[in-house]
Image: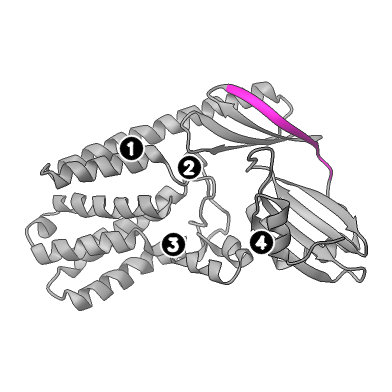
Amino acid sequence: MDTGTHIVMGIALGGLAMIDPVVANHTVTATAVMAGTIIGSQAPDVDTVLKLRNNAVYIRHHRGITHSIPAVLLWPVAIAGAIHLFVPGADFLHLWLWTFLAVFLHVFVDIFNSYGTQALRPFSNKWVALGVINTFDPTIFALHVVGLLFWAFGSNPVYTMLLMYSIIVVYYLIRFAVQAAVRHAVKNTIPSAEEIIIAPTIKFFQWRIAAISKTHHYVGRAYGRSINIYDRFDRIEIPDSPLVKAALKDKNLQAFISFSPIYRWEITEHDHVTEVRLIDLRYRSNDYYPFVAVAHLNEDLEIINSYTGWIFSEDKLHKKLDFMPN
């Protein structure tokens, strides 16, 4: 989920913590728990600082080790310990328990996005992504805001948050049902599809679709059960050539492949320079595919420059690469 949603989740959990008599009857502990749930709801995303290095490192590691099983166990200890240093009068056990719940829920709800997490590490490096909730879901955010407003105007925080989370659970179940209906509609539209990727958008009834058959890639959108296929590309394996092998050793292309389950490729010659481009098919926007990885190689198969990330125009891509072939 996005940062804003994680923040309101942390505050809401601080209100729900009033169900715990130790928290409800001890102001110092309640204050510490509120700090713990807010910080705990943000902590796993500390790996966002990897963007300061480069996109390749960020793409390969975001929602990786910081969302793993060891991290879920260690974050609450570190956060509760740090808070307890400043608020020694707080009950440490209950501070740790509610901080743990905040960290766990952060990782748990991220699983429902299309990006997913490596939540099963160290037992598996597989990305777990159920793809039913958009990274920012306005319904979930709005429900939290409404719940917090009711609390601010005097309603019981425990009953308010329990009702709010009950509604959210039902909302998640509805999203799974809608996704299943869309998947069924895609199978009827593309009977030959061997793999179907359905990703949510910010709009409730609208979904992004990418599918693979033995011969083609398909890209489209679902509006309810109405399926619109916008693009169909021949499915051609990337050449097993020295050029491609050299390009795929590049860190940006490697990061892209680790993240993108369905993509197509293009190889273009430009006067002594060859461009190898990988194009993620899940994110079509205004007839453009903005998530790409690009590498330029010279005649000696050396990488001149490369980039991976979101680019919405060729001009911006060339600026990122700081190189424009003639």
Q: Residues within 10 Å of mark 4 (few under 14, many from 20)?
A: many
Mark 2 vs 4, N-terminal side: 2
- What residue is disc 3 on? 45
Residue at disc 1, secondary structure: helix
Q: If the image is split into quadrants, where does the C terminus sit?
A: bottom right
Q: CA distance from mark 4 to mark 3?
A: 19 Å
The residue lying toward the viewer, choosing from 10 and 192, is 10
Task: Tell me which segment is drawn in magenta.
Answer: 226-236
Mark 3 vs 1, N-terminal side: 3
- What residue is disc 1 on? 168
- What residue is disc 4 on? 255
Figure check: 91 above or below 290: below
- Prevalent SS, magenta region: strand
Image-based side of 33 in relation to 89, left or right: right
Kindly identify which numbered label has been placed on residue 134: 2
Q: Amino acid at mark 2?
A: Asn
Q: CA distance from mark 1 to mark 2?
A: 14 Å
How far across and how far down the image is residue 320, in percent? 68, 63
Q: Amino acid at mark 1?
A: Ile
Q: Residues within 10 Å of mark 2 (few under 14, many from 20)?
A: many
